[in-house]
């Protein structure tokens, strides 16, 4: 059956190729293109490995070169790369065929890439064309020799992944270690990206002595947030009951209205108090609230019939005066329900904090990390809570003055974010009570404190108890068991600190802050092994646990990983597989998707984009590729879905931007799409298209460079100095279409060599404007998105680009994905010495139907991942 399917696909491919010549390339569907591309894969060819090969010293296969390869190269390549003519300064006849010890391995890699991607010989020179079988023979010989050369270089060089944690890894490590959910390392500078685009590359992550001091200060501040001393502080608590607010207004003879009367239409679009039982309503804008000294946070009063009606885009503004503390968590608890339950409509609450100190001085900032949806009905309202670290948000600098000017008040806004349309039965959020309390603690002492200062019978003996605290803390911080001598050193430091602090805990926090500034916490270290039986190049189990957790969680190992590593069980194949599955199922794996995708695709460039003025659209653009990657990962879908898919990951705002109907709500979900949407995969993601534009229109050069660098891992060389720019003041140039301008620029000798490689890839994106919206016309002229690659391959727009990638460049893309993910996993740039391992991983991936989840398991089980 499989043979029959392959035969049919080959026939289809042959037919479609002939149709493509007549300009009917659309005859082959992208799904068929995927299957055809797999059939062509050199990694899927049946090869019988020699079981003795791994134990023998590789030798150069010069005999096969002289017999089979050299005649083919001489016939098809020497006319352009021989004695009479040497384009690109390449003389094929002078390359040393011994790749293992010869000097020409880099030039042979260029030859291999050109041949395997059908770039050479050029299609416009039929006299020198290579038959597929001949091309395959050369590629197979070169691939084998390159892999042998790679193994020899790998075994003769030392690779190092020794590096410090990135800013985001350090932040997550502190959060996980101390149980604090909020960002802790915002003051650290951002990292520089490597040539591969990654911020976790060992070549860039070093540290100065001044940085160590900054890390200690950050660690100390985080520890002070996690721990407490003395008695439980008195909380400042506000309770705003809508029943009480209505009673106040009624006692002041406020004007009321009746929900059942026709005049209610004047009031229903503005926030107001409403008695749901009587229908009585009163306009209400918030006003001033004062703390209640006797109030106890966390109480749940009976549901009241009096509610605040908060329509779409309205917000309740509460004046909290000046009584909130400087530090600690502010817990905002709101009981809310929906007025209607239409599943296509959503409503969420957002918190904003502001101050208005004078006519010319004010600020307003969103302080909630995310909008929280209101999902329950008003008859069965839900409790929503936000936890806000007061020390991290902007505050009124005049709040402690004794004078009334500048104004000292601080305001909390509760905003309804909704897609609800107008109408008689519109969706409103109904709130009956609000509680604001700071500093808020779930328990006393808080769990973050008792996780460090554990319960012990030895609490009365500071010497013994201090060692217990340090043993437990240092094991997590250093990600390994600690010795008595190491604990002694920190106890000596404790002895120096203790006289200067009133309590054991406060002195010990200073010691623990020093531990958080040690290289063993800040760096991914690789200790010298004393086990003679173990290869010195192999990671220990504890080092493997750290590499694994930093890869998948951007953080330190949890207790389960550490215990398995300490027991020597983590490397057992089934145990390792189970742990990877557990880690990918954990919410912390979202960090991997976020950080890898942002760095792989270069999404940081969206930070410099100024033409996306809709905040919700910008956020949706940035979320789409991460959500797409996460979907492919969680369901082990094919990485070829990144090129094209029959589904998209969308929320309502992005779906509206793409013109895809019936997608409701701010959350991203998998949506089936038709070819008419002109979407699918990552290439048509709005963020990719927007950041690779000039702000007014598309930018083929940017899009072409991005395509080569990020998707095919074949970056073009940097432009030569003094390249002439397009003169946009020339009226003749202004009359030209985009393609004509590109052709004019490319005609210059200094430009043609680079632009002939780049521009055709970018022109294929021309149906997408500066915001990634699909278009068929520009200035009333049809869009011309057809281009011709260097190898004379025609790309008919985005579909043509996808079709070509899927039929002819699958291996290149698969290898690029393996390279990118492996470099990220190792935290170091890959070299030629890693080539054989990358080829092996790519072949394994292709044999497993290109599943992204499988690729993660393959990388983690690989020799590369388990080596220093």
Image: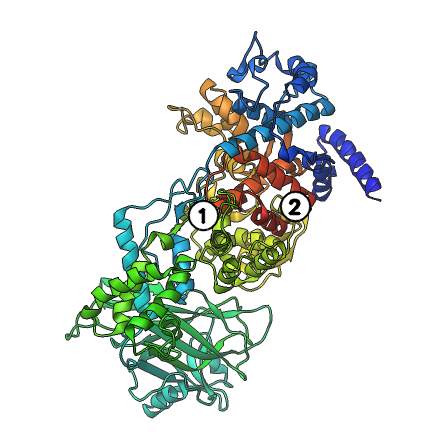
Figure check: 166 above or below 582: above
Give the residue at mark 2. Answer: 850
Query: Residue drawn 37% across and 62% down?
Result: 474
Q: Residue furthest front?
A: 532
Whether residue 390 can be seen here: no
Question: Camera-side residue: 574 or 286?
Answer: 574
Characterize the local packing of mark 2: few (<14), some (14-19) or many (20 or more) Cα atoms within 10 angstroms: many
Figure check: 55 above or below 214: above
Q: Secondary structure at mark 1?
A: loop
Disc nearest the viewer among 2 and 1: 1
Q: Residue furthest left?
A: 403
Estimate the x, y position of residue 563 in percent, counting from the top left: 50, 62
Give the residue at mark 1. Answer: 530
325 to the left or right of 812:
left
Whether residue 303 can be seen here: yes
Query: Residue drawn 83% across and 40% down?
Result: 3
* Lower sequence index among marks 2 and 1: 1
Estimate the x, y position of residue 417 in percent, counting from the top left: 46, 67
């Amino acid at each position: 059956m499989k043979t029959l399917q392959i035969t049919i696909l080959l026939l289809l491919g042959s037919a479609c190729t002939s149709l493509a010549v007549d300009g009917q390339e659309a005859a082959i569907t992208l799904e068929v293109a995927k299957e055809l591309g797999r059939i062509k894969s050199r990694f899927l060819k049946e090869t019988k490995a020699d079981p003795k090969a791994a134990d023998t010293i590789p030798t150069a296969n010069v005999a096969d070169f002289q017999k089979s390869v050299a005649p083919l190269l001489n016939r098809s390549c020497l006319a352009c790369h021989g004695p009479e003519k040497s384009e690109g300064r390449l003389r094929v006849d002078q390359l040393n065929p011994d790749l293992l010890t010869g000097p020409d391995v880099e030039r042979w890699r260029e030859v291999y890439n050109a041949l395997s991607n059908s770039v050479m010989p050029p299609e416009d020179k039929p006299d020198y064309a290579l038959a597929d079988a001949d091309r395959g023979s050369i590629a197979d010989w070169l691939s084998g020799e390159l892999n042998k050369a790679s193994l020899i270089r790998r075994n003769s060089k030392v690779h190092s992944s020794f590096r410090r944690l990135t800013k985001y890894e350090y932040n997550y490590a502190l959060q996980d270690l101390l149980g604090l959910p909020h960002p802790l390392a915002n003051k650290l500078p951002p990292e520089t990206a490597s040539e591969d685009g990654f911020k976790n590359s060992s070549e860039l992550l070093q540290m100065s002595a001044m940085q160590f001091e900054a890390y200690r200060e950050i660690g100390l501040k985080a520890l002070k947030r996690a721990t407490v001393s003395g008695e439980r502080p008195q909380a400042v608590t506000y309770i705003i009951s809508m029943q009480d607010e209505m009673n106040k207004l009624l006692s002041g003879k406020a004007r009321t209205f009746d929900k059942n009367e026709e005049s209610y239409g004047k009031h229903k679009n503005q926030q107001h108090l409403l008695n749901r039982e009587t229908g009585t309503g009163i306009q209400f804008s918030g006003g001033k609230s004062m703390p209640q000294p006797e109030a106890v946070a966390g109480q749940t009063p009976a549901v009241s019939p009096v509610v605040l009606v908060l329509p779409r885009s309205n917000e309740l503004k509460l004046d909290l005066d000046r009584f909130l503390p400087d530090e600690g968590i502010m817990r905002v608890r709101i009981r809310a329900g929906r007025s209607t339950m239409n599943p296509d409509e959503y409503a969420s609450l957002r918190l904003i904090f502001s101050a208005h100190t004078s006519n010319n001085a004010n600020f307003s900032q969103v302080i909630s990390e995310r909008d929280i949806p209101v999902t329950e009905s008003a008859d069965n309202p839900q409790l929503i809570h936000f936890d806000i670290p007061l020390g991290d948000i902007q505050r009124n600098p005049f709040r402690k003055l004794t004078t009334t000017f500048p104004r000292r008040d601080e305001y909390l806004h509760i905003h309804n974010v909704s897609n609800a349309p107008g109408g008689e039965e519109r969706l409103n959020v109904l709130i009956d009570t609000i509680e604001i309390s700071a500093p808020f603690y779930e328990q006393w002492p808080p769990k973050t404190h008792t996780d460090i200062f554990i319960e012990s019978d030895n609490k009365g003996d500071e010497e013994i108890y201090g060692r217990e605290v340090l043993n437990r803390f240092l094991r997590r911080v250093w990600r390994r068991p600690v010795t008595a001598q190491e604990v002694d050193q920190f106890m000596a430091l404790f002895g120096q600190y203790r006289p200067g602090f009133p309590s054991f805990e406060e002195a010990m926090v200073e010691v623990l802050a020093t531990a958080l500034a040690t290289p063993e916490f800040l760096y991914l270290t690789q200790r010298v092994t004393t086990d003679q039986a173990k290869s010195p190049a192999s990671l220990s189990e504890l080092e493997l646990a750290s590499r694994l957790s930093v890869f998948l969680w951007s953080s330190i190992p949890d207790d389960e990983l550490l215990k398995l590593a300490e027991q020597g069980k983590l490397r057992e194949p089934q145990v390792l597989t189970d742990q990877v599955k557990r880690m990918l199922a954990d919410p912390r794996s979202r960090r991997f998707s976020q950080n890898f995708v942002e760095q792989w695709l270069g999404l940081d460039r969206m930070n410099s984009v100024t033409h996306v003025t809709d905040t919700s659209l910008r956020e949706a653009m940035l979320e789409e590729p991460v959500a797409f990657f996460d979907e492919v990962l969680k369901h082990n879908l094919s990485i070829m879905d990144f090129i094209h898919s029959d589904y998209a990951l969308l929320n309502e705002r992005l779906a509206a931007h793409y013109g895809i109907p019936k997608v409701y709500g701010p959350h991203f979900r998998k949506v089936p799409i038709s070819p008419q949407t002109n979407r699918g995969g990552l290439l048509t993601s709005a963020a990719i298209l927007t950041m690779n534009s000039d702000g007014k229109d598309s930018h083929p050069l940017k899009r072409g460079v991005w395509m080569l660098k990020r998707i095919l891992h074949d970056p073009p060389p940097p432009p030569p100095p003094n390249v002439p720019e397009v003169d946009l003041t020339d009226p003749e140039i202004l009359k030209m279409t985009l393609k004509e301008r590109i052709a004019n620029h490319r005609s210059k000798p200094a430009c043609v060599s680079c632009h002939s490689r780049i521009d055709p890839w970018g022109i294929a994106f021309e149906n997408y404007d500066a915001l990634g919206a699909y278009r068929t016309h520009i200035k009333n002229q049809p869009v011309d998105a057809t281009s011709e690659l260097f190898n004379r391959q025609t790309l008919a727009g985005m579909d043509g680009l996808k079709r070509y990638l899927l039929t002819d460049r699958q291996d290149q893309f698969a290898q690029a994905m393996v390279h990118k993910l492996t470099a990220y996993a190792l935290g170091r740039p890959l070299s030629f010495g890693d080539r054989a391992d990358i080829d092996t991983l790519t072949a394994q991936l292709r044999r497993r139907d290109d599943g992204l989840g499988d690729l993660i398991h393959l990388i983690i089980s690989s020799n590369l991942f388990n080596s220093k």
